[in-house]
Amino acid sequence: MKEDFFKIGYSAYLNNNKKQKWTSLIFEKIAKHKLIFAIIFIALICATINFWLIFKFMYVLEASAFVY
């Protein structure tokens, strides 16, 4: 009887669907495609290390040119 008076419904509490955040969506995509993500990540790390080593080698060449 009180439920009819206040018009309380319990279905809204049972269907409490929260909106999915974009970060959890990204983590789900990474978890689903682990191999592709690992290959891309390794390629980016290798490219970064390659450029860093090239610039360090150029620095060594420039420093050795001043010595002679």
Image (cartoon, grey):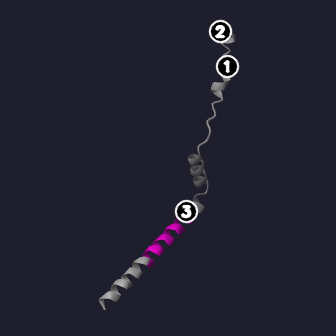
Mark drawn on residue 38 = 3
Distance from label 2 to label 1 (Cα)?
A: 11 Å
Examine the rendered structure and indicate whether residue 22 appears above or below residue 66.
above
Q: Which residue is mark 1?
A: 9
Q: Quadrant of the N terminus?
A: top right
Magenta includes 17? no
Label 2 Cα neighbours within 10 Å, binned few <14 / some 14-19 / many ≥20:
few
The part of the image, by quadrant, that contains residue 38 is bottom right
Q: Residue at x 35, y 88 (%)?
A: 65
Distance from label 3 to label 2 (Cα)?
A: 59 Å
Q: Amino acid at mark 2?
A: Lys
Q: Position of residue 42 (x, y in %)?
A: 52, 66
Q: Residue at x 49, y 67 (%)?
A: 45
Residue at the bottom extreme of this rendering:
68
Query: Range of the magenta residues?
Result: 39-54
Q: Which residue is mark 2?
A: 2
Mark drawn on residue 54 = none
Q: Earlier in the sequence, mark 1 or mark 3?
A: 1
Distance from label 1 to label 3 (Cα)?
A: 48 Å
The part of the image, by quadrant, that contains residue 8 is top right
Q: Position of residue 22 (x, y in %)?
A: 59, 47
